[in-house]
Amino acid sequence: MSILAKTPPMGWNSWNTFGNNISEDLVKGVADAFISRGLKDVGYEYIVIDDCWSEKQRDVNGRLVADKKKFPGGMKALADYIHSKGLKFGIYSCVGTHTCAGYPGSFDHEFTDAQTFAEWGVDYLKYDYCYKPRNVSGEDLYKRMALALRNSGRDIVLSACNWGNDDVKKWIRESGANLYRSTGDISDNWKSILDIFHSQLNEGWSGGIDCWNDMDMLVVGMGGSGENEMVMSTGCNTSEYMAHFSIWAMMNSALMIGCDIRNMTEQTAKILTNKDVIALNQDIEGRGPYCIRQWNNMENVFSLIKPLSGGDYAVAMINISDQKGEMSLQFYDIGLPNASGMGFDFYDCWKHESIGFFTERISLDIEPHECRVFRLKVAKR
Ligand code: GLA
Protein backbone atom coordinates (compact mmCIF):
# COMPACT_ATOMS: atom_id res chain seq x y z
CA MET A 1 0.00 0.00 0.00
CA SER A 2 1.33 3.40 -0.84
CA ILE A 3 0.14 6.94 -1.32
CA LEU A 4 0.84 7.74 -4.96
CA ALA A 5 0.74 11.54 -4.77
CA LYS A 6 1.86 12.77 -1.36
CA THR A 7 2.74 16.10 -2.96
CA PRO A 8 1.70 17.64 -6.31
CA PRO A 9 3.09 15.50 -9.16
CA MET A 10 6.00 17.01 -11.10
CA GLY A 11 6.99 16.08 -14.62
CA TRP A 12 6.78 16.87 -18.33
CA ASN A 13 3.96 16.41 -20.83
CA SER A 14 4.26 16.31 -24.62
CA TRP A 15 1.08 18.23 -25.52
CA ASN A 16 1.93 21.94 -25.17
CA THR A 17 4.86 21.97 -27.53
CA PHE A 18 4.47 18.88 -29.68
CA GLY A 19 0.75 18.06 -30.03
CA ASN A 20 0.46 15.28 -32.57
CA ASN A 21 4.15 15.37 -33.46
CA ILE A 22 5.47 12.89 -30.90
CA SER A 23 7.88 9.98 -31.21
CA GLU A 24 10.04 7.52 -29.40
CA ASP A 25 13.15 9.60 -30.11
CA LEU A 26 11.55 12.72 -28.71
CA VAL A 27 10.55 10.98 -25.49
CA LYS A 28 13.96 9.40 -25.04
CA GLY A 29 15.60 12.76 -25.62
CA VAL A 30 13.33 14.28 -22.99
CA ALA A 31 14.29 11.54 -20.52
CA ASP A 32 17.96 12.29 -21.18
CA ALA A 33 17.35 16.00 -20.64
CA PHE A 34 15.66 15.29 -17.29
CA ILE A 35 19.07 14.13 -16.15
CA SER A 36 21.43 16.44 -18.00
CA ARG A 37 19.47 19.63 -17.30
CA GLY A 38 18.99 18.91 -13.60
CA LEU A 39 15.23 18.38 -13.62
CA LYS A 40 15.34 15.00 -11.93
CA ASP A 41 17.57 16.42 -9.19
CA VAL A 42 14.91 18.93 -8.15
CA GLY A 43 12.01 16.46 -8.16
CA TYR A 44 10.56 16.17 -11.67
CA GLU A 45 9.81 12.51 -12.31
CA TYR A 46 6.92 11.82 -14.72
CA ILE A 47 7.37 11.84 -18.48
CA VAL A 48 3.86 11.87 -19.94
CA ILE A 49 2.94 11.19 -23.56
CA ASP A 50 -0.31 13.02 -24.26
CA ASP A 51 -2.87 12.43 -27.02
CA CYS A 52 -2.04 10.96 -30.47
CA TRP A 53 0.22 8.08 -29.42
CA SER A 54 -1.90 5.13 -30.58
CA GLU A 55 -3.07 3.52 -33.79
CA LYS A 56 -6.58 4.56 -34.84
CA GLN A 57 -7.90 1.01 -34.28
CA ARG A 58 -7.66 -1.42 -31.40
CA ASP A 59 -6.20 -4.87 -32.20
CA VAL A 60 -8.28 -8.05 -32.62
CA ASN A 61 -8.32 -8.54 -28.85
CA GLY A 62 -9.68 -5.06 -28.27
CA ARG A 63 -6.37 -3.75 -26.99
CA LEU A 64 -4.83 -0.37 -27.66
CA VAL A 65 -1.79 -0.44 -29.94
CA ALA A 66 1.02 2.12 -29.99
CA ASP A 67 1.44 3.94 -33.33
CA LYS A 68 3.95 1.81 -35.19
CA LYS A 69 5.64 4.71 -36.96
CA LYS A 70 5.90 7.02 -33.97
CA PHE A 71 6.83 4.32 -31.46
CA PRO A 72 8.41 1.46 -33.45
CA GLY A 73 9.94 -0.13 -30.34
CA GLY A 74 6.58 -0.21 -28.55
CA MET A 75 5.58 1.25 -25.22
CA LYS A 76 7.09 -1.43 -22.99
CA ALA A 77 10.60 -0.73 -24.30
CA LEU A 78 10.06 3.00 -23.96
CA ALA A 79 8.87 2.56 -20.38
CA ASP A 80 11.97 0.47 -19.68
CA TYR A 81 14.17 3.25 -21.03
CA ILE A 82 12.47 5.85 -18.84
CA HIS A 83 12.64 3.59 -15.79
CA SER A 84 16.33 2.93 -16.40
CA LYS A 85 16.89 6.65 -15.76
CA GLY A 86 15.04 6.46 -12.46
CA LEU A 87 12.04 8.26 -13.95
CA LYS A 88 8.37 7.38 -14.38
CA PHE A 89 6.26 6.88 -17.47
CA GLY A 90 2.88 8.48 -18.16
CA ILE A 91 0.39 7.96 -20.94
CA TYR A 92 -2.99 9.39 -21.99
CA SER A 93 -6.50 8.19 -22.64
CA CYS A 94 -10.04 9.45 -22.39
CA VAL A 95 -13.30 8.62 -20.59
CA GLY A 96 -15.15 8.79 -23.91
CA THR A 97 -15.34 6.68 -27.03
CA HIS A 98 -12.51 8.73 -28.57
CA THR A 99 -9.72 10.94 -27.32
CA CYS A 100 -9.95 14.66 -28.00
CA ALA A 101 -7.83 14.22 -31.14
CA GLY A 102 -9.98 11.30 -32.36
CA TYR A 103 -7.96 8.23 -31.30
CA PRO A 104 -9.66 5.33 -29.48
CA GLY A 105 -10.89 6.26 -25.99
CA SER A 106 -11.25 3.92 -23.03
CA PHE A 107 -15.05 4.01 -22.66
CA ASP A 108 -16.24 0.49 -21.89
CA HIS A 109 -12.63 -0.75 -22.22
CA GLU A 110 -11.48 0.54 -18.86
CA PHE A 111 -10.31 -2.75 -17.40
CA THR A 112 -8.61 -3.95 -20.58
CA ASP A 113 -6.78 -0.65 -20.94
CA ALA A 114 -5.72 -0.51 -17.30
CA GLN A 115 -4.32 -4.01 -17.78
CA THR A 116 -2.45 -3.02 -20.94
CA PHE A 117 -0.99 0.05 -19.26
CA ALA A 118 0.11 -1.99 -16.26
CA GLU A 119 1.82 -4.53 -18.56
CA TRP A 120 3.65 -1.75 -20.39
CA GLY A 121 4.95 -0.32 -17.12
CA VAL A 122 2.85 2.84 -17.10
CA ASP A 123 3.01 4.85 -13.85
CA TYR A 124 0.61 7.70 -14.62
CA LEU A 125 -2.54 8.04 -16.71
CA LYS A 126 -3.89 11.38 -17.85
CA TYR A 127 -7.58 10.76 -18.45
CA ASP A 128 -9.42 13.28 -20.63
CA TYR A 129 -13.12 14.14 -21.10
CA CYS A 130 -13.90 14.27 -24.82
CA TYR A 131 -16.60 12.11 -26.52
CA LYS A 132 -18.19 11.25 -23.20
CA PRO A 133 -21.54 9.49 -23.65
CA ARG A 134 -24.21 11.85 -22.31
CA ASN A 135 -26.08 9.22 -20.37
CA VAL A 136 -23.16 8.40 -18.07
CA SER A 137 -21.83 10.88 -15.54
CA GLY A 138 -18.21 11.95 -15.48
CA GLU A 139 -18.12 10.96 -11.85
CA ASP A 140 -19.02 7.36 -12.73
CA LEU A 141 -16.42 7.22 -15.49
CA TYR A 142 -13.58 8.43 -13.28
CA LYS A 143 -14.69 5.98 -10.61
CA ARG A 144 -14.50 3.19 -13.16
CA MET A 145 -10.98 3.95 -14.32
CA ALA A 146 -9.82 4.49 -10.75
CA LEU A 147 -11.12 1.07 -9.80
CA ALA A 148 -9.53 -0.53 -12.87
CA LEU A 149 -6.14 1.06 -12.21
CA ARG A 150 -6.24 0.24 -8.52
CA ASN A 151 -6.70 -3.40 -9.45
CA SER A 152 -4.24 -3.54 -12.33
CA GLY A 153 -1.42 -4.89 -10.19
CA ARG A 154 0.63 -1.73 -10.66
CA ASP A 155 0.71 1.67 -8.95
CA ILE A 156 -0.68 4.07 -11.56
CA VAL A 157 -1.48 7.69 -10.77
CA LEU A 158 -4.86 8.79 -12.16
CA SER A 159 -4.74 12.33 -13.52
CA ALA A 160 -8.32 13.39 -14.28
CA CYS A 161 -8.77 16.03 -16.96
CA ASN A 162 -12.35 17.28 -17.18
CA TRP A 163 -11.42 20.98 -17.32
CA GLY A 164 -13.25 21.86 -14.09
CA ASN A 165 -16.62 20.83 -15.55
CA ASP A 166 -19.59 19.30 -13.72
CA ASP A 167 -18.57 20.61 -10.30
CA VAL A 168 -15.56 18.31 -10.34
CA LYS A 169 -14.26 19.51 -6.98
CA LYS A 170 -17.36 18.11 -5.29
CA TRP A 171 -16.71 14.50 -6.29
CA ILE A 172 -13.24 14.00 -7.64
CA ARG A 173 -11.50 13.07 -4.40
CA GLU A 174 -14.04 10.33 -3.66
CA SER A 175 -13.64 8.95 -7.19
CA GLY A 176 -10.11 7.85 -6.39
CA ALA A 177 -8.23 10.17 -8.80
CA ASN A 178 -4.88 11.59 -7.64
CA LEU A 179 -5.12 14.95 -9.39
CA TYR A 180 -7.68 16.78 -11.49
CA ARG A 181 -7.64 19.54 -14.06
CA SER A 182 -9.66 22.47 -12.78
CA THR A 183 -9.56 24.70 -15.84
CA GLY A 184 -9.72 24.75 -19.62
CA ASP A 185 -6.60 24.51 -21.76
CA ILE A 186 -3.76 26.96 -21.26
CA SER A 187 -2.11 28.86 -24.08
CA ASP A 188 1.28 30.47 -24.20
CA ASN A 189 0.35 34.04 -23.24
CA TRP A 190 -0.05 36.18 -20.12
CA LYS A 191 -3.84 36.54 -20.42
CA SER A 192 -4.33 32.78 -20.36
CA ILE A 193 -2.16 32.50 -17.23
CA LEU A 194 -4.22 35.22 -15.53
CA ASP A 195 -7.54 33.66 -16.52
CA ILE A 196 -6.49 30.40 -14.89
CA PHE A 197 -5.14 32.21 -11.82
CA HIS A 198 -8.40 34.13 -11.35
CA SER A 199 -10.53 31.05 -11.86
CA GLN A 200 -8.78 29.30 -8.97
CA LEU A 201 -8.47 32.25 -6.58
CA ASN A 202 -10.83 32.04 -3.60
CA GLU A 203 -12.14 28.76 -4.91
CA GLY A 204 -12.07 27.12 -1.52
CA TRP A 205 -10.79 23.57 -1.47
CA SER A 206 -8.19 23.30 -4.16
CA GLY A 207 -6.64 19.94 -3.63
CA GLY A 208 -4.59 18.28 -0.97
CA ILE A 209 -2.74 15.11 -0.29
CA ASP A 210 -3.37 12.47 -3.01
CA CYS A 211 -5.89 14.59 -4.93
CA TRP A 212 -4.25 17.75 -6.27
CA ASN A 213 -5.50 20.65 -8.31
CA ASP A 214 -3.96 20.66 -11.79
CA MET A 215 -4.03 24.13 -13.34
CA ASP A 216 -2.72 22.68 -16.64
CA MET A 217 0.75 22.16 -18.01
CA LEU A 218 3.23 25.00 -17.67
CA VAL A 219 4.01 27.21 -20.65
CA VAL A 220 7.27 28.41 -19.06
CA GLY A 221 10.01 28.49 -21.70
CA MET A 222 7.78 28.02 -24.75
CA GLY A 223 8.51 31.58 -25.85
CA GLY A 224 5.87 31.59 -28.58
CA SER A 225 7.26 28.47 -30.23
CA GLY A 226 6.06 24.91 -30.65
CA GLU A 227 4.22 22.69 -33.06
CA ASN A 228 0.82 22.69 -31.40
CA GLU A 229 -1.29 25.54 -32.72
CA MET A 230 -3.87 25.04 -29.98
CA VAL A 231 -1.38 26.09 -27.30
CA MET A 232 1.13 28.19 -29.23
CA SER A 233 0.63 31.94 -28.88
CA THR A 234 2.55 35.18 -28.40
CA GLY A 235 4.70 33.82 -25.58
CA CYS A 236 5.53 35.65 -22.34
CA ASN A 237 8.51 37.60 -21.03
CA THR A 238 10.80 36.23 -18.33
CA SER A 239 9.08 37.93 -15.44
CA GLU A 240 5.69 36.62 -16.63
CA TYR A 241 7.02 33.06 -16.79
CA MET A 242 8.47 33.49 -13.29
CA ALA A 243 5.10 34.73 -12.05
CA HIS A 244 3.33 31.81 -13.77
CA PHE A 245 5.65 29.30 -12.12
CA SER A 246 5.32 31.02 -8.73
CA ILE A 247 1.52 31.05 -8.87
CA TRP A 248 1.24 27.38 -9.88
CA ALA A 249 3.65 26.47 -7.09
CA MET A 250 1.84 28.54 -4.46
CA MET A 251 -1.59 27.20 -5.45
CA ASN A 252 -0.40 23.59 -5.09
CA SER A 253 -0.87 22.81 -8.77
CA ALA A 254 0.83 19.85 -10.35
CA LEU A 255 4.02 21.13 -12.01
CA MET A 256 4.05 19.56 -15.46
CA ILE A 257 6.53 21.21 -17.81
CA GLY A 258 5.28 21.88 -21.34
CA CYS A 259 8.30 23.30 -23.19
CA ASP A 260 10.97 21.49 -25.18
CA ILE A 261 13.39 20.83 -22.34
CA ARG A 262 15.96 19.35 -24.73
CA ASN A 263 16.59 22.86 -26.03
CA MET A 264 15.61 25.07 -23.12
CA THR A 265 17.62 28.21 -22.38
CA GLU A 266 19.56 28.70 -19.16
CA GLN A 267 16.94 31.25 -18.12
CA THR A 268 14.13 28.71 -18.53
CA ALA A 269 16.11 26.06 -16.65
CA LYS A 270 16.67 28.53 -13.83
CA ILE A 271 12.94 29.11 -13.47
CA LEU A 272 11.92 25.45 -13.67
CA THR A 273 14.61 24.26 -11.27
CA ASN A 274 14.18 26.93 -8.59
CA LYS A 275 14.39 24.73 -5.51
CA ASP A 276 13.17 27.44 -3.14
CA VAL A 277 9.92 27.87 -5.09
CA ILE A 278 9.49 24.13 -5.69
CA ALA A 279 9.82 23.53 -1.92
CA LEU A 280 6.72 25.66 -1.32
CA ASN A 281 4.74 23.58 -3.82
CA GLN A 282 6.00 20.31 -2.39
CA ASP A 283 5.44 21.21 1.26
CA ILE A 284 4.19 18.09 2.95
CA GLU A 285 1.14 19.71 4.55
CA GLY A 286 -0.25 20.67 1.14
CA ARG A 287 -2.21 23.69 2.30
CA GLY A 288 -3.59 26.04 -0.33
CA PRO A 289 -3.06 29.79 0.06
CA TYR A 290 -5.43 32.53 1.12
CA CYS A 291 -5.39 35.88 -0.61
CA ILE A 292 -4.99 39.42 0.71
CA ARG A 293 -5.58 42.16 -1.80
CA GLN A 294 -3.77 45.51 -1.68
CA TRP A 295 -6.38 47.83 -0.08
CA ASN A 296 -6.06 50.63 -2.66
CA ASN A 297 -5.45 48.45 -5.71
CA MET A 298 -7.70 45.46 -5.09
CA GLU A 299 -7.97 44.24 -8.67
CA ASN A 300 -4.27 44.27 -9.47
CA VAL A 301 -2.05 43.58 -6.50
CA PHE A 302 -2.41 40.49 -4.36
CA SER A 303 -0.56 38.52 -1.72
CA LEU A 304 -0.99 34.78 -1.50
CA ILE A 305 -0.23 33.42 1.97
CA LYS A 306 0.44 29.74 2.49
CA PRO A 307 1.20 28.10 5.84
CA LEU A 308 4.06 25.61 5.55
CA SER A 309 4.91 22.68 7.74
CA GLY A 310 7.21 23.53 10.63
CA GLY A 311 6.08 27.13 11.22
CA ASP A 312 7.34 28.99 8.14
CA TYR A 313 4.95 30.85 5.83
CA ALA A 314 5.18 31.40 2.09
CA VAL A 315 4.12 34.77 0.72
CA ALA A 316 3.81 35.60 -2.97
CA MET A 317 3.17 39.23 -3.98
CA ILE A 318 1.73 39.60 -7.45
CA ASN A 319 1.10 42.66 -9.59
CA ILE A 320 -0.96 41.78 -12.65
CA SER A 321 -1.28 45.34 -13.97
CA ASP A 322 0.86 47.12 -16.54
CA GLN A 323 1.96 49.76 -14.00
CA LYS A 324 4.25 49.51 -11.03
CA GLY A 325 2.23 48.64 -7.92
CA GLU A 326 2.80 48.70 -4.19
CA MET A 327 2.01 45.79 -1.88
CA SER A 328 1.75 46.78 1.74
CA LEU A 329 1.26 43.72 3.89
CA GLN A 330 0.16 44.29 7.50
CA PHE A 331 1.38 41.43 9.64
CA TYR A 332 -1.73 41.44 11.82
CA ASP A 333 -3.57 40.33 8.65
CA ILE A 334 -1.53 37.14 8.57
CA GLY A 335 -1.68 36.30 12.26
CA LEU A 336 1.09 38.36 13.86
CA PRO A 337 -0.20 41.12 16.15
CA ASN A 338 2.13 43.94 17.06
CA ALA A 339 1.96 43.05 20.76
CA SER A 340 3.51 39.67 20.00
CA GLY A 341 6.96 41.24 20.07
CA MET A 342 7.81 39.18 17.01
CA GLY A 343 8.62 39.90 13.39
CA PHE A 344 9.41 38.07 10.17
CA ASP A 345 12.64 37.37 8.39
CA PHE A 346 11.93 37.58 4.64
CA TYR A 347 13.91 35.16 2.49
CA ASP A 348 13.55 35.94 -1.23
CA CYS A 349 12.93 32.68 -3.11
CA TRP A 350 13.93 34.14 -6.48
CA LYS A 351 17.06 36.00 -5.33
CA HIS A 352 17.95 33.20 -2.89
CA GLU A 353 18.85 35.57 -0.07
CA SER A 354 17.26 37.24 2.92
CA ILE A 355 16.02 40.79 2.31
CA GLY A 356 15.86 41.55 6.04
CA PHE A 357 13.84 41.40 9.24
CA PHE A 358 10.53 43.28 9.35
CA THR A 359 8.13 44.15 12.14
CA GLU A 360 4.47 45.20 11.83
CA ARG A 361 4.43 45.49 8.03
CA ILE A 362 6.36 45.31 4.80
CA SER A 363 5.80 47.54 1.77
CA LEU A 364 7.34 46.64 -1.55
CA ASP A 365 7.11 47.92 -5.08
CA ILE A 366 6.12 45.17 -7.43
CA GLU A 367 6.94 45.59 -11.10
CA PRO A 368 4.26 45.01 -13.77
CA HIS A 369 3.55 41.28 -14.19
CA GLU A 370 5.98 40.45 -11.44
CA CYS A 371 5.54 37.97 -8.62
CA ARG A 372 7.92 38.16 -5.66
CA VAL A 373 8.05 35.07 -3.50
CA PHE A 374 9.25 34.87 0.09
CA ARG A 375 9.66 32.32 2.84
CA LEU A 376 8.94 33.92 6.20
CA LYS A 377 10.39 32.87 9.52
CA VAL A 378 9.04 34.20 12.79
CA ALA A 379 11.69 35.62 15.14
CA LYS A 380 11.85 37.85 18.22
CA ARG A 381 12.50 41.54 17.68
C1 GLA B 1 -7.66 18.27 -24.08
C2 GLA B 1 -6.80 18.45 -22.84
C3 GLA B 1 -5.40 18.85 -23.24
C4 GLA B 1 -4.81 17.82 -24.19
C5 GLA B 1 -5.72 17.65 -25.39
C6 GLA B 1 -5.27 16.50 -26.28
O1 GLA B 1 -7.89 19.49 -24.71
O2 GLA B 1 -7.37 19.38 -21.96
O3 GLA B 1 -4.58 19.02 -22.10
O4 GLA B 1 -4.66 16.62 -23.50
O5 GLA B 1 -7.07 17.37 -25.00
O6 GLA B 1 -6.10 16.31 -27.38
Image (tube, rainbow, N blue to C red):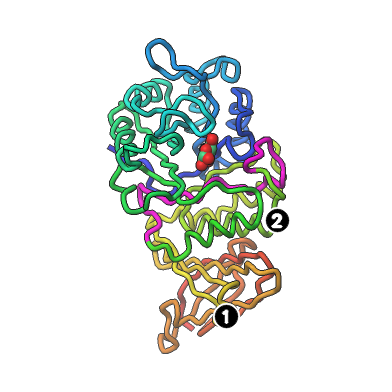
Viewer-nearest residue: 49 or 246: 49
Residue under pointer 2: 238
**Which corner quadrant holds the N terminus?**
top left
Above or below, 48 against 7 in this view is above
Q: Residues within 10 Å of mark 2 (few under 14, many from 20)?
A: some
Q: Residue 168: say if magenta.
A: no
Above or below, 226 against 371 in this view is above
Q: In the shown orientation, is residue 63 left or right of residue 49?
A: left
Query: Can you tell which mark lies on residue 328?
Result: 1
Q: Which residues are magenta?
A: 205-231
Q: In the shown orientation, is residue 58 left or right of residue 1?
A: right
- Extreme-bottom residue of the structure: 339
Viewer-nearest residue: 381 or 192: 192
Q: CA distance from mark 1 to mark 2?
A: 24 Å
Residue 177 in percent (x, y) is at: 35, 42
Residue 283 visible within the image = yes
Above or below, 231 against 150 in this view is below
Circles 1 and 2: CB atoms closer than 8 Å? no
Query: Can you tell which mark lies on residue 374?
Result: none
> Which amino acid, mark 2?
Thr
Residue 311 in percent (x, y) is at: 40, 68
Kindly identify the residue that appears in the image at 60 percent across and 72 percent down: 300
Q: Which one is earlier in the sequence, the residue at label 1 or at label 2? A: 2
